[in-house]
Every structure is written in C-alpha cells, then in structure tokens.
Amino acid sequence: MAATNCVIREVVKDVWTFSCPFARFGFIPFGGRSTAIKMQNGDVWVLASTPLTDETKNKLDEIGPVKWIIGADAVHHLYLDEFKKAYPQAKLIAENEAVKKKAGTDLKFDGAWGADPAGTQYGFESDIKHCYFSGFANKDIAFFHTASKTLIEADLLFNLPATEQYSKIGSSGKLPIFGTLHPYMWLHKKFVWSLGKDKEAMKRDVRTVANWDFERIIPCHGDVIEKDGNKAWREAYKWYLD
C-alpha cells in the first residue's frame, strides 16, 4: 500500500503510535491511531485502527514479530483484514459485534470480548491488562501497558482536536462548531454518560480502569495525553465515580 500522511513515533520505550487523518462521516476530523507495543518477550501487540501502509508495516517489522492483532471495540474493525493478511500467524482478537460484522469472510478470530467468558485470558496479560466495557454503546475495551504506565483506548475518551493526526496535511484538525472535546469539559462528561447503556456495569468498569496506575493515555481520536492520564480519566468519568 502506498505511503500516507501518518505520523509514526515511539511515544515511550517500546510503545509506538501511528497517527493518521480520519474524518468521521467525511467531515468531522476525529483522527485515527493504531498503537504497537513490544512485549517483554519481543513479540509485538498491535491495536489495529488505521491502514496498514508500507510505512506502518516497515516499522512494525522493524520492531519485532507481530503476534497479536487487536480490535478495540465494535466499530474499529475496518483494517483487521489487511493486518491479518499481512501477519497470518498473529492471533486476532476483537469485540464480538465486530466479529459478527466479518461473518461471511474468511477472517478467523482467536477470541471475542463479549462472547468469551468474563475473565478470559488471551496470553498477553503479563504485559497488558484489559477491561471490557460491556455497558458502553460501542463495547470498548481499555488496555493498560503496565511497564510504560500507558492506557490505550478507542472511543472511551477523546482528546480533540486531532493536532498530531492532521499535522502532515496542514490542517488544524479542529472540530466544526465545538473546536475541541477533551476530558475536562462538561461536554465530554455528558458524552460518556449518554453512551453508558448499563450504568451499573459502567461504574464497575470505570472504577477498574481508574484503579490502574497509568500516567499516559493513547486515544484513537485526538492527541496523546502525556501526563496526569489517570486524573484525566477520573475527570472524564466523574459522573460514574461520584
């Protein structure tokens, strides 16, 4: 695949981001991001949420053997096929609704949040914890890389505008009308409250994540939060925690 306008960087030791322009409905600049983690045993775990360009693949191959391909929720599944095709030996795990959307294709999954029993271990837990938000509209999974104190997530928390993701195409990445959407805004609290379809399940899972010792948040949409990530999470989800 040809090169794109993605920004590839090592955010912290053994954690790389692939930050690309992406407009929801063709005009809302949310940005997109994949994240790759080199695990202690040398294997590479990748949350696949952007195209597998030549540049992306070259960097992944440089980091190490891709052994895990992860879908972040029910809607971030567009590029799972091309990642699995490039890395057929990697284990592919996604949310069950995303798995169902691939029915009729030859894509084979090795696990599905929402279908597997609660507490299922997939084999990467010595490096990366996970929490499945069954009560969230998009059925997201939060991931915690303990070594770098980094939380990785898709639609649970936004930090817009998507400055880094749009930096190579000369755009501010600002949202129409609002301009921004970040964890400390009332609008963000309202946003995540409205997407909580099972409030009790949300309270449980929000608290699980709040009790993780992370400093950084890598969202799929918007800029990386480099410090005080746990504080940002608690503020965004204040209505669930109070």
Image (cartoon, helix red, strand yellow):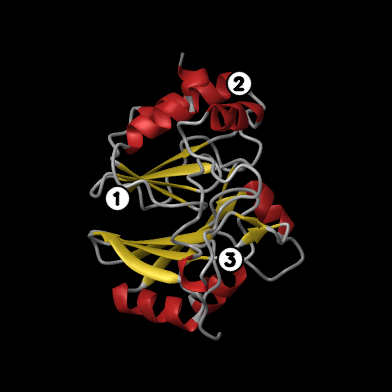
Q: Nearer the viewer, residue 174 or 113?
A: 174
Circles 3, 2 touching at the beta carbon (< 8 Å): no
Residue found at the far bottom of this picture: 2
Upstream in sequence: badge 3 or badge 2: 3
Nearest the viewer among 126 and 38 is 38
Q: Nearer the viewer, mark 1 or mark 2?
A: 2
Residue at left 47%, top 21%? 238
Q: Secondary structure at mark 2?
A: helix
Above or below: residue 203 compared with residue 78: above
Q: CA distance from mark 3 to mark 2?
A: 30 Å
Name the mark on residue 127.
1
Residue identifier under label 2: 199
Kindly indicate whether the residue at mark 3 contacts the one at mark 1 (C-beta within 8 angstroms).
Answer: no
Q: Residue at x 38, y 28 (%)?
A: 210
Can residue 135 be spotted in the picture? no
Q: For the residue marked with disc 1, what is the amino acid?
A: Asp
Q: Amino acid at mark 2?
A: Lys
Residue 80 is tagged as 3
Q: Is residue 83 left or right of residue 74?
A: left
Residue at position x 59%, y 34% from top? Answer: 134
Q: Position of residue 187 (x, y in %)?
A: 58, 31
